[in-house]
Amino acid sequence: MGRYIVRRLLWMIPMLFIVSVITFAFAHAVPGGPFNREKPLPAEIIANLEKYYGLDQPVWKQYVDWFGGIVTRLDFGPVYSSRSRRVNDIFADHLPVSAQLGILATLIAVGIGMPLGILAALKQNTFWDYLGMAGAIFGVSVPNIVLGPLMILIFALTLGWLPVAGWGTPAQMIMPALALGTGSAAVIARLTRASMLQVIREDYIRTARAKGLGERIVMVRHALKNALIPVATILGPMFAALITGTFIVELIFAIPGMGKYFITSITNRDYPVVMGAFMVWAVALILANIAVDITYAFLDPRIRFD
Amino acid sequence: MTTQELTAQQKAALRLSERQGKPANLWRDAWDRLLRNRASVMGGVIVLALLATAFLASAIAPYHYAEGDSFEAYTVPNWLIGILPGNIEAYAKTGTKFLFGADYLGRDLLSRLMYGTRVSLPVGFMGAITALVIGLVYGCISGYYGGKVDNFMMRVVDIMYAFPTMLLIILLMAFFKSTFADISPGSPAYTFNRVNDVVDRLLGLQGGGMLFIFMGIGVTAWMGMARLARGQILSLKEKEFIEAARMIGAGDIRIIVRHVLPNIIGPCLVYVTLAIPGYISTEVFLSFIGLGVDPPTPSWGTLISEGARSMRSYPHMVIFPALALSITMFAFNFLGDGLRDALDPKMKGSS
């Protein structure tokens, strides 16, 4: 197990290297430089700026400087549109907000989805089951780009319970986190229910009941633990999708996360910000996938890695 | 519980006796099961209605999508006034000319919604086709040949998975938009733009840049399908009937096409049907941030973004596109769920 984790972590290095090369190539293939403004700057000034930021160097040298800076000093480079700030400053300001939003949404997805799925399975074919699953299909089908404005319209503009936009206070966090997490909560609820229903019919559940174990122990120790294996496998990709999918919700609720910044950086050709964002998220995605595989092994002792 | 199971069995036996003589056929059985599922029939009907709208938009839409009258800007339909909160009559122009009202340029919202199906549906279907074609071929090759080939191909998929999908699509769209903005005749970009124009015209739109969106979504659409197809093939290829086919001298291509594909196409179809809402909402998001279709081509994403901007004063502008999008999502999800239950009754109820 330990060796497996180490090997997976070592695999990260070539993967991140390839991601960095592709991202760098794409970012530099976009025509137009960061200093092409609507009102053109004099050629000398552009030349000076490019010299200052090392853009007059050959492309491979630029790549080595950039990637070397990340690896050796965790320095993601300069921001072309602002002389006083570096990419690290931008990340320090905006990434935590996006991360908070993504984590809150994941908590909502798991916290609502799992109990709902378990409840629906335990009370199969009752009113609660139907209600829960109707809610789930609603959650799956209504995209957050609709849910966001809808919630603002109802809870902020009409009822006035919650603030329309912004980030910081718990009241401001409720709607964005719900808008982002509902879809995933619905997916988890449906998967949990299906998986529970399958497990409940297994022989070992009958055995556990037959030997006189209490219903609670049978459900928690025997059924739930096995039913959660398929759920655990989608948690990684889901967490990854929520962390990287915060953009839409950030734009709708005017949240100062990475979303807005990333999009303006792309239109401004501010490559270091764009490339840095890719690297940070790639690390998060790869780690999430490794975490899932480890959880998987922990939940299902039949799975062996070597 | 037992009685329910019995009746279900009896019903099955009854159905079996009804079609005596007719050979059992997986696809006909699946079709029968699908028709018995009311939710998915409804989903299918809605999808067909949307398709019809897309085909007939220029005939049935009351106005053209780009045609606006600034005197009619922000018109709220009369029938909606009573439903919406607040006193909209105090400041808004009302009228009966437009069923769903007008947008900020006085363009008919209903017409723009109708033409919007010419953006959303093609995006959904093209995403599904790309996923099926590239993903299936990729997964089949990887899973069938196994060994080093498989190892290499799956590492490629792993690397693709390390890219944040949404960011990658945004970057690609920005790349396309600026690379192909070059319109000097003779350059590759020029040729590409002509192809794009043809695509737009085929879809019944005057410009919009649909080809770029297809490509952006296609780049990230195939990986999930590739993994699914590979997994299915891995468990199939050790089966006896594959061995038997190889024994009598069938070639790889023949085995894959005649013996493997028919066995894995069911789950793959279900997968893409359930993935279509994802492709559609990706385009909606791209248009929301201004990197999707070019105005004045109406995408539901553009409509939602325009509506969200004046949501406080003119909520009708966001409500209708949001509804249209949600209904479309419901339809594809119901259809996909029904397909899954029909094609693989064992999987019933799982997602």
Image (tube, rainbow, N blue to C red):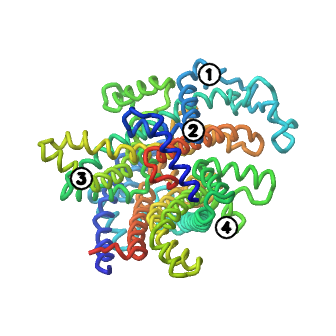
Discs 1, 2: same chain: yes
State left or right for residue B151 relative to residue A140: left
**Residue labelled with disc 1:** B64
Q: How far apart are labels 4 and 2 at the CA level?
A: 41 Å
The chain identifier of the residue carrying mark 1 reads B
Q: Amino acid at mark 1?
A: His
Q: Which mark is residue B237?
A: 3
The secondary structure type at the circle numbered 4 is loop
Q: Residues within 10 Å of mark 4 (few under 14, many from 20)?
A: few
Residue A128 placement (x, y as % from top left):
67, 60
3 or 2: mark nearer the eye: 3
User: What mark, if any, has residue B253 been given in the picture?
Assistant: none
**What residue is disc 2 on?**
B43
Which amino acid does the dot numbered 4 rest on? Gly
Pick the front one: A103 or B262: B262
- Residue at 31% of width from left, 41% of height from top? B262
Q: Residues within 10 Å of mark 2 (few under 14, many from 20)?
A: many
Image disc number at residue A168: 4
Looking at the image, do the residues carrying marks 1 and 2 touch, with CB atoms under 8 Å apart?
no
Residue B283, visible in the rendered structure: no
Disc 1 or 2, which lies upstream in sequence?
A: 2
Q: Residue B193 in the image: x percent, y percent? A: 39, 29
| Element carrying mark 1 | loop
Along the viewing direction, whichever of A173 and A182 lies nearer the viewer: A182
Q: CA gap, disc 3 to disc 1?
A: 54 Å
